[in-house]
Image: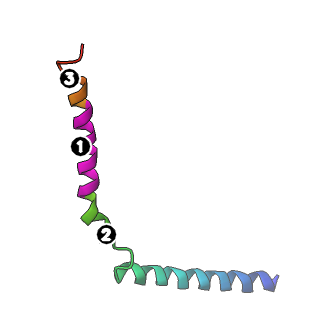
Amino acid sequence: MSVIYILLTISVIVAIIFFIAFITAVRSGQYDDSYTPSVRMLFEDELVKTKSKNKSSNHNPTTN
């Protein structure tokens, strides 16, 4: 029975260590994404061009 208490204590200590490491990484900016915002407008422009091409081909007066 004492082995369960030892394993439980060790697992709680390891969990606390991982939680502290996670909080430290978040505060230091490890998970900040600086690449996607600079490229996001390029992806949106391609979507707008695709939609406008579809609209212009659907409303072309020369095709009957």
Residue 40 is tagged as none
Q: Mark 2 points at which residue?
A: 35
The mark nearer the N terminus, 2 or 3, is 2
Where's the C terminus, which quadrant? top left
Label 3 neighbour load within 10 Å: few <14, some 14-19, many 20+: few
Q: Name the residue under label 3.
A: 59
Q: Where is residue 31 in the image (x, y as percent from the top left)?
A: 38, 74
Q: Where is residue 54 in the image (x, y as percent from the top left)?
A: 27, 32
Magenta stretch secondary structure, dominant: helix
Question: Which residue occupies 80% across, 86% down?
Answer: 2
The type of colouring in the image is rainbow
Tell me which corner region of the image, top left, top right, bottom left or bottom right, holds residue 13. Answer: bottom right
Report the span colored magenta: 41-54
Please state which of the two labelled residues, at mark 2 or mark 3, is closer to the viewer: 3
Per the model, the C-alpha gap separating discs 3 and 1 is: 17 Å
Q: Name the residue under label 1.
A: 48
The mark nearer the N terminus, 1 or 2, is 2
